[in-house]
Every structure is written in structure tokens, then in C-alpha cells.
Amino acid sequence: MCPASSPENRTTLTPDTPVQYLKGVGPKLAQRFEKLGIRTLADLLEHYPRRYLDFTHPYPPGEAPAGMACVVRAELLAKQGGRYVSGGRRVEKATAGDGVATLELTWFNNPYTIQKLTVGQEYYFEGEVTGGLLRRQMTNPQVRTAEQVAASPLAAVYPQTEGLTSAAIGRCVAQLLPHAELLGEPLPPALLQKYRLPGKAQAVREIHAPASAEAVQEARRRLIFEELLILQLGMGLLKSRGAAAAGAPMRRADPGPFWASLPFAPTGAQRRAVEEILADMAGPRSMNRLLQGDVGSGKTLVAAAALWAAVGEGYQGALLAPTELLAEQHAETLNRLLAPFGIRVALLTGGLKAAARRTTLAAIRAGEANVVVGTHAILSEGVEFARLGLAVIDEQHRFGVRQRGALAEKGASPHLLVMSATPIPRTLGLLIYGDLDISILDELPPGRRPVKTRVMTGKRRKDLYGFLDREIGQGRQVYIVCPAIEEGPDAGLTPVKTYYEEVAKALLPDRRVGLMHGKLKPKEKAAVMEDFRAGRLDALVSTTVIEVGVDVPNATVMVIENAERYGLSALHQLRGRVGRGAAESWCFLVSDNESDSVRSRLRFLCSTTDGFAVAQYDLETRGPGDFFGSRQHGLPALQIADLAADTRTLHAAQKEAAALLAADPLLQKPEHALLAAAVARMFDRAGPMN
């Protein structure tokens, strides 16, 4: 598989050459590469290692630490013949040593490795050492000669997939490295000089086959800067594309009548956000704004004020939600807030029957539906607005930049407001959402009481259920969240169905307990959730599918089993499902994990209800994955950069991207052709999110 020889017809190689034409790959292996997002030779060269095996610090056999992966240098003392064992597997065995201790080596279904080894020669063996001091063992080790270690002391380990090992990927990459120049040099010479960066081809060779740890750092520094620059250029182009259009021109609205219609006073943060939005909508260019607010901070009210202003100027508004349940909830809220002004709110989801859908589409086309709330159905063909002036997207991280663009295309560059309940530290948010201006809601509406949070072990579960029973007896409702849907390899995780039957129903025998998880059909999930919202269920056992947007003011307790399995930001989001009414509310984090770091994280969550403080703590202790996810909130997936760890580089990249776009707004100059192509490739890879 991918022998280390040059590809055939090397003169025809281009960055876009499909990987299947690399010598030794072919269509079947190309399908496995595609699972890793590798379709072309450029994709393969930019599939960077996730770590390295360091062969420069080997152990003698007797000193190798047991139970961990390491490198052992020893002389091959003997080879045993191969034999077959139960299950049809072939086993090869050998013995290595240094005159003091020996190491027993075993390979399964790999006769070729041992055939190439010579008794009496010294080798470097990499793998996990097991056994005691007198009998050390290593299974399926990787083997290097002294010459190979001298040529490449750090061996790359790649993200892999079933049927495609890191070693096989490495052989394919090695075959391509002599042709690294085919990627071209996207960075302008001035930037290379200013930041003292190596060229692209050199950096790619060193990231895959480094001569030293220092070479890895230099290559990473170059490639991280390039990736973040391309990201920021793409975001800048998106922003300028929206800003270039005149949008829906509006006069500056006075929100006074809207505030006066409410039975309560808005928070100062809500007033500030609305003023920022109305100022944008009255400007000469289309608004492109992110409304970021913690759980329960009142984002929907701000969106309603913006929609009210747009309709008052003769335009239609649209609100796109990620689920039918959330769309229905938004439609109810907006109807309640906007009906006093005679504004008609229409609901458009995939679940509408044909006749109702036709009626709704006709009302949208004729402009009779002032505000349209819906799911992805709003983006489908056949949905035509008479005069769309404002598009609102809820839960920004569930939609990609393409879907935002698709909604904008439903009108003549309407104003765009995207909302997210996922707290992100402000400075990082300003960089990530480079194509959006940001408004932040950092106050909770009056009457919202902080949720009391406690950590407890499973030993106190009966006491906890006694408390749940008493809460239900007072007319309240409770959530119980479990991380696993069904049996899996993870010890200590009870599947949600088993928990529902053997724990929740057993400990709440006289209560109405419901079950919800991601494998239910959408209609089944909606029915269970509607039963809970309507008070027909006392308790809901669920996976995290209840996390986003569900509003049940009567729910006062959130129980999260195996709480150590979640990031703090995810726990905070779940906690936000309670405390939405006037009654005192509780969140119980159940965990038997005794790790100091786990207990410290959970105790921190008990000490604060500030989502931005939680996000900052998560960022510092666990990295960005918990709240960005693998897709960084709809942004293109990054190959090597880390949005949290590489913040300084991100700042520099944003500054240079702004300068480049100021001089060449659409990257049309010949010297920027490779940069423009790199931007297109990155955002094409992103695709829409579901």
C-alpha cells in the first residue's frame, strides 16, 4: 500500500489530482481516504500529523516503563517461526535484548515485518511494554533501523480511519513529499519576511518528516499562521459581500412603542442590543450581527423588537430555528409579542401537510405573512418572500455560513441577525465571528432566580429521588439526563433506556415518567416533549437532545448523571433548561469520579451561573472543543490551528487579512490568486451543517 516510490506521470501532478491516482492507492483505498476528508493530493499533503513517535530517547529493555508506549533499543537475539492460533490469526514471535534484560516481541498477521529483521542487528522497537521486570513484552511494535532513526528521528502519527492505518497514510505522504512544491506558495513574500516564516513546501516537508522538535515548531508556526490567515480572509470576504449591498433601507425606528407594549421592563442589555440592531438596520449597508447571550438572557425578545421594526417599515421578517419544536416555540412567543401590533406570524416546517403548506407559501409570497418562523424548510425551493428585510437565525452553531447565505438570498440582501446561547469569551468571539458585529446580553431578566447547583455521588441517589418526588408533589417537573443511548464499550455508563426502566421508574413508581433520546423519530421526540411541556409528564429521562432552546417554566430540577462526561459549557447549557419560572430551581451533578481535576471542574460550576465565566474556565482547562465542537460553530474545520491556544497568531492573522482586503477587497490581483484559491478550498470543505 503506497510504496515509497515516486508517482507515475509526475509531470501531470496538480494539487487537485484525485488521491486515487497516487501509485498504490486506487478507487477502494481512495474511498477510505475520503472518510478523512482527503480527496486530492493537496488534501493528503495537508493532512497533518496529530503527534510524533520520538525515537531519539530509547530505553534499554530492562528500564522501559511498563504500561505506556515507549521506544526500546535492543539487539534482535532470535526469531521464531510463525504459527496460526484460534480465530485464524497468524502469530510471529522474536526476542530482543541488550545482555542485561530481554524483550519478547509478538506480531499478529504481519509476517513481512519479522522477515525483514536480521538476527544480531540492533533495532528501535516502539510500542506499549507489558509484563514484569523479568519478562518484558511488546505486541505489534513499529520497528526502525539506526539509519532510519538518523534520517527521521520523529515518526509522524496521523488521524486514521478503519482500514487505513497511520503507517499506511505515512507511506503515501512520503511518496508525495518530493513534490510538496505543487501546493504553491500562497503567502506574499512580505509576510514570510515579516514573520520569519519558512516557505510552504519546506514547512509541509518538516511537519511530516521533521529532523528535530524545533523543526516541528517552525513548521507548525508557519502552517497555523497560514490557516488562520485564510480563515480570516474568508470571513472578511463574507462580511464585505454582505456589506457591499444596499440591503433593505429603513428609517431609524423608535423602540418605545414596542417596550411600552410589554407587561415587564426589558433589561439594560436588551435595550442596548436593540439600539445597536436598529442603528445597523438604518445604515447604508446590510446588517451582519451576532446576538450572543447566556441561557435565558432574553434573545428572543430582542429578535422580536427587530422584527417589529422591520415590519413597521413595510418588510417581512424570517426566523430560522434548528428544530421543529424550537420553531413552534418561537412562533408562539413571537405571536404573543407581535399580535398587539396586528403582525401576522406564520409557521413553516417540514411537518406541515400539503394543503397547509400551500396556504402558508401563498401568504408568504403575497406578503400577508409578516413574519415567517421555520426550520430548514424556509431555505427550500418554492419559498418566495414578497419583501424580505430581516433574517434571524437562532442557535448559530447549528447552521453553517452557507445556510446563512442561502437565507440571505431569499431577499435582496436582507439584514441578518444570528443568535447563539453558547457563551464565548468576548475577545475570542470577535475573532471567530470575523464576518459579524457582536451584541452581548450579559444580564438576566428580572424574576429569573439563579439555579442552585450541587455535586453528589450515586450513593445518594435515593435521597435525591426523594427530593424529586417532593418537588413533583408540589406540582413541579424534573429533567434527568444520561449520556449513553444504548450499551457500549464505556464501563460505568448506564444506557438511558435501562436507567429509565430500572432507576427512574423504580424510584418514582407513582409518577408519570417519559423517555426521550436521539434515536426516536422526530415526531416521537416532538410528542414526548409536548407531553412534558403540557404537564402530562412529571419527569423526563433524556439524553442531551433537550439541551437547546426547550422552554418549560414549570421544570425546577435538572439531574445530570455521569456529569464528568460533559464539558462545563455543555453542563451550563443543560442547567439553563431549569430556572425559567419564578420558583426556586436546582441542578444536581451526579458523579462517582474521584479525580481531583474532575471534582475541581464540577465545583467551579457550582460556584457560578455566569456562562461567560464558565466558557473561559472551559477554554483554559479543556480547550475549545466543548463549545466550538469539531466544526467551530459552522466555520470550516481547521487542520492544524487551535482557536483557543493560537489566539496571538489569530490576532496577527486577522490584522494581516484586514490589510490584504483593504488593498485587494476581492483578492483579484494575480499575486493573490493562490490565497483566493485556498480560501475557496477551505470554505468549500466546510459545506452546510445539519
Image (tube, grey):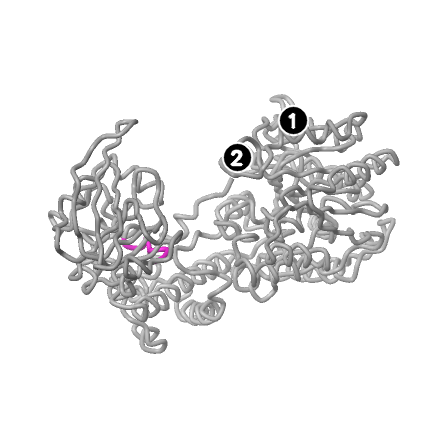
Would you call the spot at circle 2 few (<14 residues within 10 Å), some (14-19), or many (20 or more)? Answer: few
Q: Is residue 137 magenta?
A: no
Main SS, magenta region, reads: loop
Q: Is 115 on the left-hand or right-hand side of 17?
A: left
Residue 219, relative to residue 67: is it above or below? below
Q: Depth-wise, is mark 2 or mark 1 nearer the camera?
A: 2
Q: Earlier in the sequence, mark 2 or mark 1?
A: 1
Q: Quadrant of the N terminus?
A: top left
Q: In the rendered structure, which amino acid carries the disc numbered 2?
A: Ser
Give how far apart the Cα atoms at labels 2 and 1 are.
16 Å
Viewer-side residue, 638 vs 230: 638
- Seen at 77% across and 40% down, the residue is 464
x%, y% of residue 648?
48, 71
Tell me the tag on residue 327: none
Q: In the rendered structure, which amino acid carries the disc numbered 1?
A: Thr
State whether residue 327 appears in this view.
yes
- Seen at 39% across and 61% down, the residue is 227
SS at badge 1: helix
x%, y% of residue 29?
25, 38
Viewer-side residue, 152 vs 267: 152
Q: Which residue is mark 2?
A: 380
Q: Is 10 on the left-hand or right-hand side of 366?
A: left
Would you call the spot at circle 1 few (<14 residues within 10 Å), some (14-19), or many (20 or more)? Answer: few
Q: Which residue is mark 1?
A: 359
